[in-house]
Amino acid sequence: MKKSHALLLAFGLSASGFVLWGARKWPVSAQSTRPVSLIRLYTGTDGQTHSEERTVKLMPNRKLSEVSDPEKASTVQFWRTSPGFTNDWHPAPARQYNIRLTGRVEVELGGGKKIRLDPGQIVLAEDVTGRGHITRCIGPEDCLSVLIPLDGKQ
């Protein structure tokens, strides 16, 4: 056995950079992190829904993890629609996160701008007043989301 491997094993580490505890492996260091981004929908002074991309700030939390500031949520719902479903012009029913799990959605804003949402994308819907937006389930599969209404400020 190489001397470097013997040293790694003496400290409970494998050559692949994982901590060895029985048959389990835990990474020794966190991977370089990608920012968590979301699309924010909001009502502008013109009464129309607009969008912007935002990054969620994550801070170190114990070893090998990061966490955002907590936000109060009132409930959690799952929402599934069939391919071809269209929800015509509507504001968001509440300030809420909409996390896309499956299917592809197209959100149309005032002025004709269209945003495509793929699985894994996050929307913070804050356009609770005004004309709102159109939501369409596009593609061949059901569209499934997690809806998390937020308590507090609008």
Image: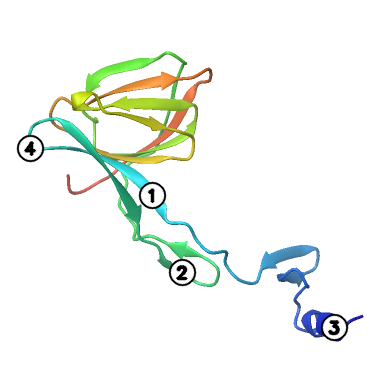
SS at circle 3: helix
| Residue 101 disc label | none
Q: How far apart are labels 2 and 1 at the CA level?
A: 19 Å
Q: Nearer the viewer, mark 2 or mark 1?
A: 1
Q: Earlier in the sequence, mark 4 or mark 1?
A: 1
Q: What's the image's color scheme?
A: rainbow
Rendered residue at 26%/28% (across/down): 113
Q: How far apart are labels 2 and 3 at the CA level?
A: 31 Å
Rendered residue at 46%/27% (across/down): 104
Instruction: Classify residue 95 as left or right of residue 129.
Output: right
Q: Nearer the viewer, mark 2 or mark 4?
A: 4
Report x, y in % for residue 145.
43, 32
Report x, y in % for residue 76.
39, 38
Choose top left, top right, bottom left or bottom right for residue 114: top left
Which residue is disc 1 drawn over? 37
The three-letter code of the residue at mark 3 reads Ala
Q: Earlier in the sequence, mark 1 or mark 3?
A: 3
Which residue is disc 2 drawn over? 61
Instruction: Classify residue 92 as left or right of residue 45.
Output: right
Instruction: Classify residue 133 as left or right of residue 67.
Output: left
- Is residue 126 positioned above or below 15 on the image? above
- Is residue 119 positioned above or below 70 on the image? above
**Mark 4: few/some/many CA within 10 Å (<14, 14-19, 20+):** few
Which residue is disc 4 drawn over? 45
Q: Earlier in the sequence, mark 2 or mark 3?
A: 3
Rendered residue at 50%/21% (across/down): 142
| Residue 6 disc label | 3
